[in-house]
Image (spheres, rainbow, N blue to C red):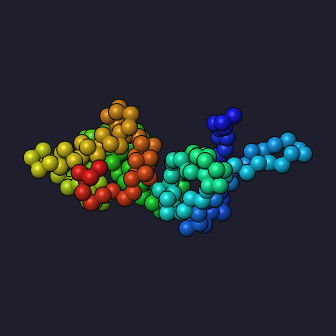
Amino acid sequence: NLNPVWDDDREIADYAPGDPLHFTVMDKDMWPKQDDFLGEVTLPAEQFYPYSFEGSLLLLDAGPGIHALLRVKISVSGTSDERRLRDIFDKCDAKGDGKINKRELIKALRSDQEVADFFRLPRQIRQEDGSRDNMERIFQEIDKDDDRDISWEEFREFFTSHPPPPADPSAW
């Protein structure tokens, strides 16, 4: 099979922040044949910690002229950054239903300076100063399924792949 799928799910209990992750890919053969080395790649910590990573990595030493990729998804949980994201999300989720709508976001911006600072938006959202357009753009970027609500999963995924929020919201 030229496109193998492993669907391997592992938890690294003794991970030390700052350590890279090294992947070695082998083709397992039946005894007495030796397993075949297919390639390897090292992912530096700054590419996945503390905000996770999802993407394809080019395997090195896969063989002359071979362009082999390893698709990985790394989720980092329990960090202070994730707790901060959850705290901001919960401050915006006024109804406590696990979703943020635009009205809830606007109310949270108005009532909490930390939320406004996090989104790099003013506390008062107005059409005439462009802050409404910026808020709409940010909301739509996070709301991947276009259901007019931001779920915790959408919120976490967006901010773990776009850390930290830029100082200029129009850059989103």
Q: Where 22 sits versus 92, above or below? A: below
Q: Residue at x 69, y 34 (%)?
A: 1
Q: Nearer the viewer, residue 139 or 45?
A: 45
Q: Could you say which quadrant of the image residue 22 lies in?
A: bottom right
Name of the residue lying farthest toward the left: 128
| Residue 49, x across and y down, in percent | 51, 60
Q: Nearer the viewer, residue 97 or 99?
A: 99
Q: Could you say which quadrant of the image residue 84 lies in?
A: bottom left
Q: Residue at x 33, y 48 (%)?
A: 92
| Residue 168, x across and y down, in percent | 24, 57
Q: Nearer the viewer, residue 59 or 115?
A: 59
Q: Nearer the viewer, residue 113 or 144?
A: 144
Name of the residue lying farthest toward the top: 147
| Residue 5, x across and y down, in percent | 65, 38
Tell me if residue 157 can be seen. Answer: yes
Tell me if residue 116 can be seen. Answer: no
Image side of residue 148 versus residue 77, left or right: left
Q: How many numbered marks are there?
A: 0
Q: Where 10 sits versus 15, above or below? A: above
Q: Residue at x 89, y 44 (%)?
A: 31
Q: Residue at x 68, y 54 (%)?
A: 24
